[in-house]
Image: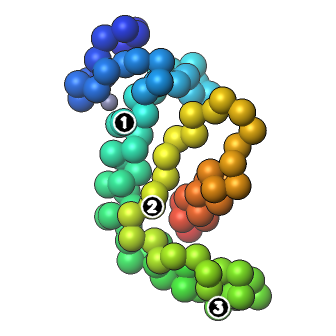
Amino acid sequence: MMRGGVCKHGHDMTPRNTYTNSQGTRVCRACVRASRKRYSAKHRDEINAYLRRWRSGRNGAAAARLPKAKVIPYKTPIVDGPPSAESLARLEQAMRAVML
Ligand SMILES: [Zn+2]
C-alpha cells in the first residue's frame, strides 16, 4: 500500500522506518513515535499519578529508581541481535505507562 513512498505524514517509508504490525499493516515508526509522544504528553498527569502509586507499592524500592514519566523515551526496537538491557528497560517502562 504505502510501500516505497512516504506515509500520509510525509515520512519516508524505508525498511528501517517501517514495520508490519500484528494486523499485517505497514506502520511508519516516525508516526508511532510522534503518536506516543502526543499520548504521553497529554496523559502526563495520569501517568505520573500511576507511577507514584506504583512506587509506593511493594515494589517501591526498585520503582523509586525510575525517572518520572515526562515524555516516554520509547523507541520502537530495530532488532539485529538480542535486545539490550537498555531496550528491555525502555520497553518495560513504556508498557507500565500504558497499563494505567
Ligand atoms: Zn509517518
Q: Which quarter of the frame holds ligand 1?
A: top left
Q: Characterize the local packing of mark 3: few (<14), some (14-19) or many (20 or more) Cα atoms within 10 angstroms.
A: few
Q: Nearer the viewer, mark 1 or mark 3?
A: 1
Q: Classify mark 1: helix, strand or loop.
A: helix
Quadrant where the N terminus is found in the figure:
top left
Disc 1/disc 3 C-alpha distance (Å): 34 Å
Closer-to-camera residue (78/43) = 78
* Position of 38 relative to 14 (above/below): below
Circles 1 and 2, Cβ within 8 Å, touching? The answer is: no
Q: Note whether residue 95 is visible.
A: no
Q: How is the image coloured?
A: rainbow
Residue situated in front as seen by the camera: 80 or 72:
80
**Residue at the image point whose x is 47% and y is 24% from the top:** 16
Q: Which mark is residue 16?
A: none
Q: Which residue is mark 1?
A: 30
Q: Which residue is mark 2?
A: 72
Task: From the image, tell me which residue sits under label 3.
Answer: 56
Secondary element under disc 2, as helix, strand or loop, is loop
Q: Amino acid at mark 3?
A: Ser
Q: Residue 67 vs residue 30: left or right? A: right
Residue plotted at (63% across, 56% down):
86
